[in-house]
Amino acid sequence: MFSPARSPLRRYGIFFTFALAVPATSVAQIDDAATPRVGAVSGAEARPKAQVMGPPAPPPVVAPRTGPLPSSLTLDQALEEAASRSPAIVAARAEVDAARARVGQAGVRSNPELSVEVENFAGTGPYSGISGTETTVSINQRLDLGGRRRARVSAAEARLAAQELRLAIAEADLAQSVREQFAVAVAARERLRLARENEERARELARIAGVLVDVGREPPLRAIRARSAAAQATAALRAAEAAEEAARRTLASFFGVDTSPSSVLGGLGEIRPAEIVASQTLEARLAAAEIAVAEAGVGQELAARRLDPSVGIGVRRIEETGDQAFVAGFSMPLPIFDRNRGNIEAARAEARSAEARLNNVLAQASARINNAEANLVAADARVEALEEAAIPEAGEALRLAQLAYQAGKIDLIELLDAQEAFASAQTELIEARLARAQAAAALARAAAQ
């Protein structure tokens, strides 16, 4: 704190000093002139300059959506509901709001100090009373000549840009999880449909087998075998019902709600990006933003070693004569012991570390994209083979087996084998379509920009 010049203290003279910080809202303002700006997520939009008194007002808080989910969800609805309700996204948006508030706070000037000094009272001799009192009231202000404020704003804006990218990554991760779980729910719905069809066929076949046993066309063992197959189909149906409900419940967990939708609508939606550039992925952009944060940290530490003087002006009243006079002062820290060298070297090391992380992220992003593309190509080939060959052939084999059984040319075991083969092919197709949807979701996430 600057202390204005005082008159020489006489022997046994006594004085005291106290300082009062003036609220920032009365004199502080944000100075955007000559302040470098770090781009937001788009990297191209410049922030408008502002002149406001004190810290800016916080942006309005968008409350997460509440209330029950729609009874039936499509994929688009699921994505929209998750983005509006997910606790993870709410937390990430709050972090962005915090970073944006720190940008405003970083541009605020330091508070002036009000200093009141009372000297030469309650002493001895002529200073035993208050007639010799000298009172000085002054205002002191530290001047930002070393660029500390500009460095703070640059660092805060760099952190804001990085936090906005982290929000985009959280949204992309959530979208991938929702797409994958929605695909799981659709696959569970299809398995449940298939299990119901299988149970109906198994029950009908058990009924027919019982009739044939009664008329002597089939031995009793065939009826037992058919009833056993029907019981197994019923057990598989119950398992499919439980799995389908669990898939919907897991999907609802991404919305932060306990009650799951009653059903999911539509097929396994797929998103296939047209162009994928590893250097433009969210992870690569975040790594580049972290380099900017580290470089801004270096600038902030360099500015911290510069010297900012303090100036003050005030009024002194001398009670003995009733006179008043102005006082002025100037103070400057002396960089004898602390020149901030350690913090500067640490910041430069962090910048080198951020550059190395960017190279690692680019390599990982390229590998992730290539793997996702390969998995999607393999999934496409599997689905195509099942749809064009395996399913039609298994269906035709079942049709011929049913005709042959009705004509008495084959026994029940062969018909059951044909039904099982057809059901297995349909199950495999469901699994293949699920794998393709998940591979497409992974590719979309890997290429997210």
Image (tube, rainbow, N blue to C red):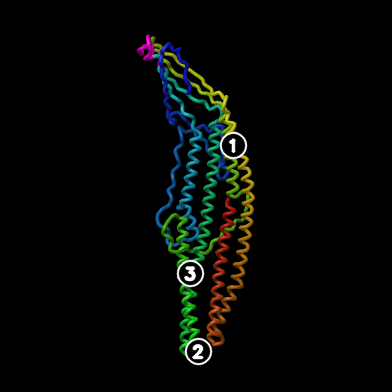
Indicate which disc, 3 or 1, sits on the residue closer to the N terminus.
3
Which range of residues does the magenta coloring cover? 121-135
> Residue 141, percent across and down?
48, 24
Residue 192 circle label: 3
Left/right placement of residue 10 relative to residue 374 reads left
User: Relative to residue 398, is residue 134 depicted above or below?
Assistant: above
Which element carries disc 3, helix, strand or loop? Answer: helix
Look at discs 3 and 1 and give the one toward the viewer.
1
Q: State if disc 3 and disc 2 touch (CB < 8 Å).
A: no
Left/right placement of residue 104 relative to residue 305 reads left
Q: CA distance from mark 2 to mark 3?
A: 34 Å
Looking at the rendered structure, the kind of residue marked 1 is Ala
Q: CA distance from mark 3 to mark 1?
A: 58 Å
Residue that numbered label 1 is attached to: 347
Residue that numbered label 2 is attached to: 217
Mark 2 Cα shell of 10 Å, populated few (<14), some (14-19), many (≥20): few
Report if residue 415 is visible in the image: yes
> Residue 279, percent across and down?
63, 48
Residue 107 covered by magenta stretch: no
Looking at the rendered structure, the kind of residue marked 2 is Arg
> Residue 377, percent across and down?
63, 62
